[in-house]
Image (cartoon, rainbow, N blue to C red):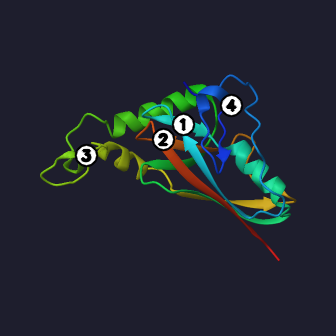
């Protein structure tokens, strides 16, 4: 199940099951004013899961006090990707279906074979799916606001869950 209420906690683990009941998203501790870098830990609940990070990135930009600059959102994992797209249930369903169809989890992959790899998670499909996505996204900050189009959302894709994942958000102010 994919809901618009998913957000991430700052520097602590956040369980999305508890937050998914709130229609407007859980309100979590905000970044400190003037802060320019923050790691976030996300606890995912499904093997393939999409998480809306938009409100947390917007909140971080707002609290940073930066009026003009760039913000960098980075995944710290090889099987946890990032993308920009519309946060709409039918489209999110289609994205998950596309990832599973183009690179299915039940094929034979050398990465899953102990003759070739020391990986015991059998997650080759997740690595390959992640290669279709990004591991970092950069956005403009203009007039103290995150520059996104009307329907654009910052989306994380868990491809090998459930797991705990880390992302970082860093803002670079223009002088």
Under tag 2, what secondary structure? strand
**Alpha carbon distance from label 3 to label 1:** 24 Å
Q: Which of marks 1 and 4 is nearer the N terminus?
A: 4
Residue bearing mark 4: 5
Q: Which residue lies furthest to the front in this view?
A: 12
Under tag 3, what secondary structure? loop
Q: Work out which quarter of the rendered image holds the C terminus and state it.
A: bottom right
Residue bearing mark 3: 120
**Alpha carbon distance from label 2 to label 4:** 16 Å
Quick check: 131 left or right of 28?
left
Under tag 4, what secondary structure? loop
**Alpha carbon distance from label 3 to label 2:** 18 Å
Mark 3 or 2: in front is 3
- For residue 81, which numbered disc appears in the image? none
Q: Where is residue 68 in the image (x, y as percent from the top left)?
A: 82, 66
Residue bearing mark 2: 158
Q: Which of marks 2 and 4 is nearer the N terminus?
A: 4
Q: Residues within 10 Å of mark 2 (few under 14, many from 20)?
A: many
**Alpha carbon distance from label 2 to label 1:** 6 Å
Residue bearing mark 1: 50
Answer yes or no: do the residues labelled 4 and 3 have beta carbons within 8 Å? no
Mark 4 or 3: in front is 3
Q: In the rendered image of this protein, does residue 66 appear above or below residue 20?
A: below
Q: Work out which quarter of the rendered image holds the N terminus and state it.
A: top right
Q: Camera-side residue: 15 or 56? A: 15
């Amino acid at each position: 199940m994919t809901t618009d209420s998913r957000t991430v906690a700052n520097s602590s683990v956040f369980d999305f099951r508890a937050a998914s009941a709130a229609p407007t998203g859980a309100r979590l501790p905000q970044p400190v004013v003037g802060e320019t870098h923050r790691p976030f830990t996300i606890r995912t609940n499904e093997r393939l899961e999409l998480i809306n990070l938009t409100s947390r990135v917007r909140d971080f930009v707002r609290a940073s006090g930066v009026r003009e600059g760039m913000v960098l959102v980075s995944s710290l994992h090889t099987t946890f990707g990032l993308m920009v797209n519309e946060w709409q249930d039918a489209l999110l369903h289609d994205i998950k279906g596309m990832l599973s169809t183009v690179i299915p989890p039940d094929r034979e992959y050398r990465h899953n074979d102990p003759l070739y790899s020391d990986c015991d998670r059998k997650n080759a499909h997740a690595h390959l799916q992640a290669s279709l996505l990004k591991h970092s996204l950069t956005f403009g900050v203009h007039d103290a606001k995150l520059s996104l189009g009307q329907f654009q959302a910052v989306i994380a894709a868990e491809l090998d869950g459930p797991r705990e994942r880390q992302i970082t958000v860093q803002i670079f102010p223009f002088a």
